Amino acid sequence: MDKFIFLHVMKTGGTTLLKEFIRIYGRENILHETKYKQDKIKNVGLLRMSDKTLTSYFPSHKDYKIIHGHFFYEKYKHLRRPFFTFLRNPIERIISHYSTCNNIDFYEFCRISSNAMTQMTGGDLTKYEFIGITDKMEESLQKLENILGCSFKRKVMNKTKNKKVMTKNQIKYIKKYNQHDIKLYEKGLNLFAKMR
């Protein structure tokens, strides 16, 4: 399989995979969606819900083997290509994402970034050809290698430094605002277990 779309949910390992896709397929064959919009005041990268309905029609999209980046499933579903994505334990993902942000209150961050995995993927994982699990990275890479017929280097990039430690109350708050993602992650784990 040499044509696919990789939906990169923030802090799930997509940057590492992008580097490998570039190495294997060549930069000229990859359409990389620019990073999610940066809020310069709060210095936090978040997808806006208004972006969900936007559809991109690149005149030359057929020239690219891979489309990769931060976007909503709806944006590229019209291309009818196989979709790949990675999911991560929602609590760990939120902590990692929040740890990269400055000048934003934790509770506000949780509210405005709630259920990001569900929103970005569209919530229906059966539409995905491959679902990797960041918490099972080695096994995920092996399964993805089998699908793509390639070999990935085992090098982690963009790992969050100085990851913040959360209190029990903060963990409860993360769970409160990410119930859909918690359920989605469980579904993802079940689907992943059935993949060869």
Image (tube, rainbow, N blue to C red):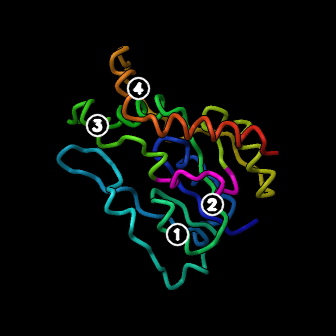
Q: Residues within 10 Å of mark 1 (few under 14, many from 20)?
A: some
Mark 4 or 1, closer to the camera: 1
Label 2 to label 1: alpha-carbon separation: 9 Å
Residue 127 counted in the magenta span: yes
Label 3 sits on residue: 109
Q: Are marks 3 and 4 in contact (CB under 8 Å)?
A: no
The image's mark for residue 83 is 2
* Residue type marked 1: Tyr
Q: Nearer the viewer, residue 122 or 19?
A: 122
Q: Residues within 10 Å of mark 3 (few under 14, many from 20)?
A: some
Q: Residue 175 in the image: x percent, y percent?
A: 42, 28
Q: Which residues are magenta?
A: 120-130
Marks 3 and 4, the one that precedes in the sequence:
3
Q: Residue 165 in the image: x percent, y percent?
A: 38, 18
The part of the image, by quadrant, that contains residue 53 is bottom left
Q: Nearer the viewer, residue 5 or 32?
A: 5
